[in-house]
Amino acid sequence: MSFAKGRRTVNSPYGALSSPRLTGMSGPCSYDRPRRYRRGAALTLFLAGVLATGAVTGTWSDEAEGAVGHGIPKRAASGARPPEAATADRAAVERAATEAIEDGKSGSQAAAEVVSRSGDRWSTIYTEGEFEDFQQQLDGAYVGVGLWVRQLAGGRTEVSRVQPGGPAARAGIAVHDRLRAIDGRTTQGQPVTETVARLRGNAPNGSRTPAAGAGTPVRLDLQRGTRRWSLTLHRIRLRTRNVTVDRPAGPHGPTRVKITSFARGTGAAVRRAVRGASPHGGVLLDLRGNTGGLVTESVATASAFLDGGLVATYDVRGSQRALYARRGGNTRLPLVVLVDGGTMSAAELLAGALQDRGRAIVVGSPTFGKGSVQMPSRLPDGSVAELTVGHYRTPSGRTVDDAGLTPDLVVEDHAERRARTVLSGLGAGT
């Protein structure tokens, strides 16, 4: 069992935090060369044509809804790619945990130290309580106050989204408010992942202290302009929507399907949206800021647009396997995929499959580049070691790790507007 995991978000699912089953097969895989590699000149002429017409359908904003902050490794400014080879050794991690427990120490903390020394950017250790909490998040439930945050230049933390109906929304907290401290501890310069844990009441990694549950208080220090204030909220159990559907131009116009992460049920929700989409308006699949999630749900989403065939290949400790779409997807619906530097992991797997298979035109900025596969395993004290075991490739054999995906149409500013222009051209040609 394995899954792809990406950047974590505040009070929303933390990327992939469970153990979905990956359907596949052993041994090398063969497949036809995707037709997108036989359509290069035609695609260039098509994009030039539709962008020249300026035809735009719909009224969506240019900003990604629910985009979240970093808290992830950044590429060097020189563009040099960090090494892929650094992976934590499973035997060493398990041995460290066992020896620590025998000495009366924290097994998860000892395991985390081994992972840290390995240089593996994606392997990590979860306490038993954290992992159980992550399982609930993949069902769309979490305990918190209903805030998303991002880290700005200079290490400041600001609110990027407020969940309607949650404690934060009822208290009047708004997007762009600065979050200065949580329970008296500054957020300045702290990783987003630590801010996440403190908002949710999770204990530090390696601690045996149970996570705070629904009803527990959390004190926030905030700032809006020159105004500073403090308030105490009480955590509650909330539910998130990982798939949202827009039809601003009416039932015959384009449909935007925004996926923030691949939690359970994502594929089924996308299939419902595809069934309700206009065959001429098409679909804008918005994967901006999508941190990844369950690979099985990413494949199920691909199945909504493909009639079977290869979605990705991956290796687990040298053993080659493959992921295939289910038959019966809608292959005629005009489709544009919108990506950015926050598109990661299982979201990159999906975008790469639709791009390589010639099923969609990908618009936006290059994606993050997280193509490694993690496999979780239980340690003797009940904590979970999530260790890198391999890497996946797109149907054409492209490696995603560190390199990311390059869109068919690279657009840094007003990407959604350009994507809608492309989609309107696709719809006009059907």
Image: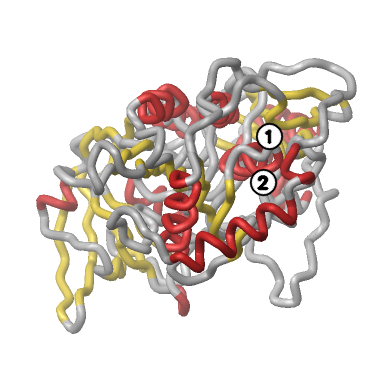
**What is the secondary structure assignment of the residue under circle 1?**
strand
Residue 230 % position (x, y): 16, 66
**What is the secondary structure assignment of the residue under circle 2?**
loop
Q: Amino acid at mark 1?
A: Gln
Residue sitting at x 35%, y 64%:
185
Regarding residue 276, the answer to whether it shows in the image is yes
In the displayed structure, 140 sits above or below 54; it is above
In the displayed structure, 303 sits above or below 358; it is above
Residue 207 % position (x, y): 50, 41
98 left or right of 267 in image:
right
Kindly report the distance in space between the C-alpha atoms of the residues bearing marks 2 and 1.
8 Å
Which dot marks residue 374? Answer: 1
Instruction: Give the colour scheme of this rendering.
Output: secondary structure
Q: Within the image, what quadrant is residue 165 found in? A: top left
Residue 239 % position (x, y): 27, 33
Neighbours of disc 2 within 10 Å: few (<14), some (14-19), many (20+): many
Q: Are discs 2 and 1 less than 8 Å apart at CB?
A: yes
381 left or right of 388 in image:
left
Residue 151 % position (x, y): 43, 67
Regarding residue 392, the answer to whether it shows in the image is no
Name the residue carrying label 2.
122
Q: Amino acid at mark 2?
A: Trp
Neighbours of disc 1 within 10 Å: few (<14), some (14-19), many (20+): many
